[in-house]
Amino acid sequence: MKEFRIENLESIEKCAGEFIRYVSQSPEIKSGVFAFYGAMGAGKTTFITALCKVLGVMDIVNSPTFTIVNEYRSAQGIPIYHFDFYRIDSIAEARNIGLDEYFTSDALCFVEWPEKAEELLPDGYVHVTITPEENGSRTVRIE
């Protein structure tokens, strides 16, 4: 388990950079699928936006709440898929968007509300929890 701390919005990109460095250098992390857990308002979309910025995404990054998936490209041309399963009503609905193809590609996949389709996540996915603290900071935990 590894923890990162976001003290405030001004420090979120620094934390995102530390997160990217850690996952890229950790031999135990073999999957490019990152499942982000946290309550509504915990900061999942905001942190994913910071991760995309650190990775050099030039597009506007926002929550795919209604589209379910947004596609971006890193500065190196790596595809990044950003999922939001909040409005998914069934496993069949999640399966119908072709998750297997996304998850088995060489892309990075950032998944919000993964508990809605957890059984479809691939083996070895990276479990990330974002927890708001009373002082307004956030803890980002890789489990």
Image: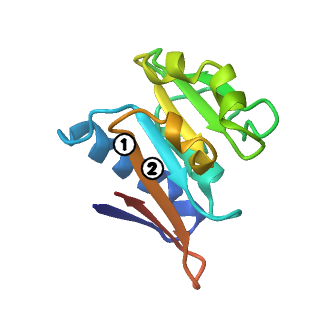
What label sits on residue 16 in the rendered view? 2
The mark tally for this picture is: 2
Q: Quadrant of residue 3?
A: bottom left
For label 1, count other residues whose C-alpha is less than 10 Å away and answer few (under 14), some (14-19) or many (20+): some
Residue 55 locus on image (x, y percent): 46, 32
Residue that appears at 73% across and 36% down: 64
**Front-most of 132 and 90?**
90
Residue that appears at 26% across and 40% down: 29
Q: Quadrant of the C terminus?
A: bottom left
From this viewpoint, which residue is outermost toward the bottom? Answer: 134
The answer to whether residue 46 shows anywhere in this view is: yes
Classify residue 11 as left or right of residue 65: left
Classify residue 124 as left or right of residue 128: left
Residue 15 locus on image (x, y percent): 43, 56
The answer to whether residue 59 shows anywhere in this view is: no
Q: Which residue type does callout 2 highlight?
A: Ala
From this viewpoint, which residue is outermost toward the right? Answer: 66
Q: Which residue is mark 1?
A: 20
Q: How is the image coloured?
A: rainbow
Q: Secondary structure at mark 1?
A: helix
Q: Quadrant of the N terminus?
A: bottom left
**Front-most of 18 and 113?**
113
From this viewpoint, which residue is outermost toward the left? Answer: 27
| CA gap, disc 2 and disc 1 | 6 Å
